[in-house]
Image (tube, helix red, strand yellow):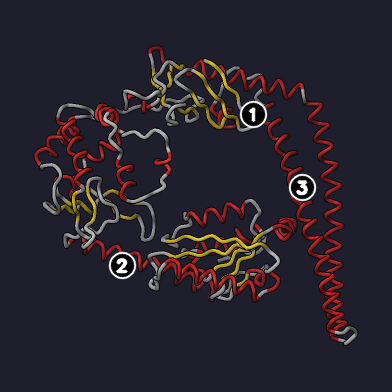
Amino acid sequence: MTGGYSGDSNRRRERDLHGKIAGYYRLSMEDDDIKEESNSITNQRLLIRRYILDHPELSHYEYCEFYDDGFSGTTMNRPGMQTMLEKIKKNEIQCVIVKDLSRFSRDYIELGDYMEQIFPFMGVRFISIAERYDSQEKMGKTADMEIGFQSLLADFYCKDISEKVRSSITVKKNQGKYATGNTPFGYRKDENDREELLIVQEEAKVVRHIFELSMAGQNLTRICRTLNDEKIPTPLEYKNQRKKQNRKELQQEHKYWQPGTVRTILTNESYHGSMVFHKSVQAQVGGNRTLLRLREEWGVLENHHPAIVSKEVFDKVQEKFSRKKAAVKEPVLYALKGKSYCGYCGRRLRVMKLAGGRLCYYCPNQSLSSHNKCLCGGVRNERLEKIVLEELQMQIGRLADTAGVSREAAERQRVAIRKIGKEIMAAEAGIAELTKRKASLLEAYHRAAYTREQYMESCRRLERQISEKRIWLKKRKEQLDSYRDLLNADMGDDENLRQYAGFESLTKEMADAFIEKIIISNERTIDIYWKFNQNHTFDL
């Protein structure tokens, strides 16, 4: 691993003024010292807090913490980790502390990138307690061989554990044990034997109903419409009744059966009692990408668990799918692709191609229920693009009218930025002088020029002055940041908008640059949410 410190001093100074110390904890099923979550996370928390108490230079900063429970260290795609990295990007975190390197990452290449490239560039101090590693002591140096070797061993260890777990699961499946985390809709695991499947009768009735509708000739969309009209809960809603969850889909006001969900049920061999496994394989040990195996390479155990539908019914339904040929559709390109949403259910709108190549918006959920108020067509893309372009040109016109005012306001902001910058430099110099006086005071105390009481009183007075200046400095720094952000945002919007003055048609580039989303209701009203300024509502 190679690297060094490449962050500039301004970035470091900015973090020192208003940064935080982040403690990061992680617990995953790959650890061989698994304990209860409260014990393991608490132990890491206590260890890091004790470290901060033992290092007074860290006690001045606000402490925040992030953790991931049940996530592998081979990937950085962990909720707690991603939240922490986002705050680091926003200059909110000045130091990261972990119990050991493997808590942060078990991928030695990625770990090396963060230790020697990313964190140094961002001006973030990184501390690993177990390895006694502190990036502040390694400034301008590469990580030593011992640290690199330890992270390499952690990577090998994790991949070895991953391979052993996968092999163990494979053995169990070959023995006929259900060693998969999730269960198909209509089944649950036996509480007395977690490797056996039992039928959930209420859900099984829904599964049989779906197969009956398919046997009666209904297609996927028609089956969804029937289920939604009958107000049958979706598999996710049924699962939530058994296991209280907080999934994003459950927070939506309108929930519908979808064709993809129905197709999955109708093609799942679990429903006639077979267990199918080895359908895919990891592209690499410890990785997330999987490759689909050939059908003849799959493992199939028939009569493995109680069937919900007969094999004859299942096979007849499969014949319907095999007779259908997948339609090859050419992608439809238009400026507002991916920007328009249904005002009733919130789903992203699609377009249908009419005669003459005209495009018309509709909501995919509209055909899934007889009672919804989703957009059912009639909104032409040509009309919508015209409205968006006209509003965009109006914004450009307003900018031309207010250009002089904007320049004057920008100049006032620049004057304020220069003034605050000088004040910050003076305050930093004052803090440095007070810190120097504090060091001189300690030297004088060692020479017996002061009594202990005199020294402590003077030291407290200096600490109070330094603390007050730091608080004032933090507020002024935040004010400076807000001025800079406002100035940059105004200039960015102005420049981006002006470059499209005179355009006679809306382009995908323009839509991506300025439009957050467009909501269209069945009453033909549209709300345009811009990435700048305020939003507007129009009638079509």
Nearest to N terminus: mark 2 or mark 3: 2
On the image, numbered disc 3 is attached to which residue? 479
| Pick the front one: 411 or 366 | 366
Q: How far from the left and from the top, in percent, is residue 392?
A: 63, 22
Question: Label 1 amino acid?
Answer: Gln
* Tag 1 residue: 534
- Please indicate whether residue 166 sits to the left or right of residue 121 in the image: left
> In which quadrant of the rendered view does residue 324 lie?
top left
Extreme residue in the right direction: 449
Upstream in sequence: badge 3 or badge 1: 3
Residue at 65 percent of width and 60 percent of height = 20
Residue at the disc numbered 2: 164
The residue at 81%/31% (across/down) is 407
Q: Helix or strand or loop: what does disc 3 sit on?
A: helix
| Residue 161 image label | none
For label 3, count other residues whose C-alpha is less than 10 Å away and answer few (under 14), some (14-19) or many (20+): some
Residue 178, quarter of picture: bottom left
Would you say 83 lies left or right of 40 here? right
Q: Secondary structure at mark 1?
A: loop
Three-letter residue code for mark 3: Gln
